[in-house]
Image (cartoon, rainbow, N blue to C red):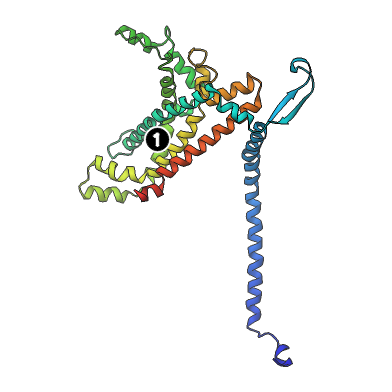
Amino acid sequence: MSRDTLSRPEPLTARPACRARRRASRTGARNARAAAVFVLPFFALFGLCFLAPIGYALHQSLFTTERTGPLGLGGREREIFAGLAHYAQALSDDRFLAGFGRVLLFGAVQIPLMIVLATALALLLESASARAVPFFRSAFFLPYGVPGVIASILWGFLYVPGISPLVKIAESVGWDLDFLSRGTVLWSLANIVTWQFTGYNMLVLIAQLKSVPGELYEAARIDGANAWQVARYLKIPLIRPALVLTGVFSIIGTLQLFAEPMVLRPLASSIDSGYTPNLHAYSQAFVGNDPHAAAAEAVLLALVACVLSFGFLRMAGPRAKERG
């Protein structure tokens, strides 16, 4: 290649293209910086309110506190590495494992019942013949606005013999009802949770039904489908994502069962400090003064919630539907 060729100036038509590329690069960099500024508060809050507590719980679960002095009542304390000792302690605790089994049984019965009720209410309120829909929608949703503690207190008055009108009515017809006995108290708790959260799940399903185009319903009616066929073959398949979402929320909420047994505990002798995993961890931390064991139990509870939630998503999600 000759020296004249190497020193030949760049064609004039290439200069605007180069300037355009540089301008586009600067614009992209500015957009990236602007996006980072908007996203940064989210990541800061996410790290502070989500990742930091999880990291601290993991740290607490791997250490233990050693106290000095006679009977461990000295003024000095130090943390020493305990490894997986607290996890082994939790997995060998019969009361903690019994609490897990109890909430799993609770969820196996209560979650399907609640979702079926929520689906039925959503379909009824969205049917063509429904009347006074805003009133009934608000009435069904109202229990969700009552805090769990207050709801448990209200239902406690309906469960305690001598106070409960339900017990008095049952006695008047010869039935012997004890809502707080060892065999029935779990289902009394399930009744409180179902009463409180069915309306919330109903609104989630109604929101999904609202997004379905009305032309699909009209086409089904023109084809001769009745209301039951429209609900079974059209509405329920179309609200499948909302049903999966409510199922995941219900699984997580079941494993977090705490307020209801905590409030009813003074009324029912069958509810002890290990009745649910959350209640057991609370007792370990604030009654037994062992926050490290409580942290290990909290981590195990979170792992079980993740496994059950992702397992349910795997079975009931879109891919499972395609395989079926």
Question: Residue 170 appears at what percent x and percent y?
Answer: 33, 10
Residue at left offset 67%, top offset 32%: 60
Q: Where is 5 relative to 37, above or below?
A: below
Query: How packed is label 1: few (under 14 Cα within 10 Å), some, or many (20 or more)?
Result: many
Residue at the outermost left position:
224
In this rendering, would 215 be left or right of 107?
Answer: left
Viewer-nearest residue: 223 or 192? 192
One can see residue 120 in this view: yes
Residue on which the image places disc 1: 202
Residue at left offset 63%, top offset 46%: 43
In this rendering, would 2 be left or right of 99?
Answer: right
Viewer-nearest residue: 199 or 180? 180
Question: Residue 166 appears at what percent x and percent y?
Answer: 37, 13
One can see residue 139 in this view: no
Residue at left offset 55%, top offset 28%: 91
Question: Residue 124 appears at what percent x and percent y?
Answer: 31, 35
Q: Secondary structure at mark 1?
A: helix
